Image: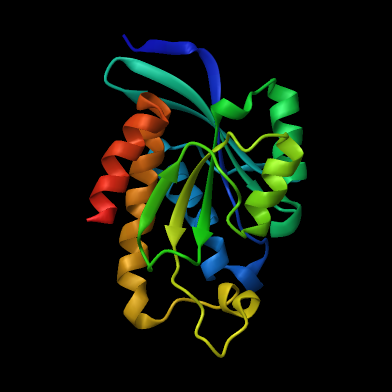
Amino acid sequence: MARQAADTTKFVVGLGNPGTRYARTRHNVGFRVLDVLRELWRTGEPREAFEGLLSDGRVCRAAETQRVMLLAPQTYMNCSGRSVRAMLDFYKGAPDELLVVLDDLALPPGRLRLRAEGSAGGHNGLDDVLRVVGTTRVARLRIGIGAAPAQMDPADYVLGRFGPDEQDAIDVAIRTAADAVEDWLFGGIDSAMAKYNRKTDE
């Protein structure tokens, strides 16, 4: 019989922009990781809540079961914190129970990097989450989307779609990111960092 993990709920937030216009753009890789997790964890279709799309899951590994909330804010990227704060307030969640999944211009396409805390690194969505939550001690999983070409505005670049030469690496990264989220869920951020940062930084 599966043992319930410590009486807590964990929270995974994927950042992106809502609507078909932004689907599968570079800025929306966080949403795509949540899509994979919903399928893996069989959470069913998300419901509208907290100005976002919310899934309530029970994830089993070995003899342990962990409750987890998956949230895709629908506020548009720069206002993501409002949705996250509403969810945490409702469930009385703490920042150290939260993992944010997002894109990163500073990493090559498909590279993953986990961190336990730190600045937003220029990412407006993460910056808003940290501002509203009130601490930089929030775990985050960054997925590299590559730097914008020199002649292109980064704001336009992140709203574009991946090229054919990038797609395979991104698809693999999204699946690997889903595995990293589950490892964080059961093993914590330090264990996940040791596993995935070493693997992707080689």
Image quadrant of residue 138?
top right
In the rendering, at what x and y percent does residue 130 appear? 68, 42
Residue 98 falls left or right of residue 33: right
In the rendering, at what x and y percent does residue 94 appear? 63, 24
Q: Is residue 170 above or below residue 70?
A: below
Q: How many marks do you count on the picture?
A: 0
List the single residue furthest toward the bottom. Answer: 151
In the rendering, at what x and y percent does residue 157 appear? 57, 78
Of residues 109 and 58, the one nearer the viewer is: 109
Please report the residue visible at 63 percent of the width from the left and 79 percent of the height from the top.
Answer: 156
Residue 132 in view of the camera = yes
Of residues 157 and 56, the one nearer the viewer is: 157
Please report the residue visible at 38 percent of the width from the left and 49 percent of the height from the top.
Answer: 177
Please report the residue visible at 61 percent of the width from the left and 51 percent of the height from the top.
Answer: 120
**Image quadrant in which the C terminus is located:** bottom left
Of residues 131 and 74, the one nearer the viewer is: 131
Image quadrant of residue 123?
bottom right
Residue 76 in view of the camera = no
Residue 35 falls left or right of residue 3: right
Image quadrant of residue 69?
top right
Please report the residue visible at 31 percent of the width from the left and 60 percent of the height from the top.
Answer: 172
**Image quadrant in which the N terminus is located:** top left
Q: Is residue 32 above or below residue 141?
A: below
Colour scheme of the rendered structure: rainbow
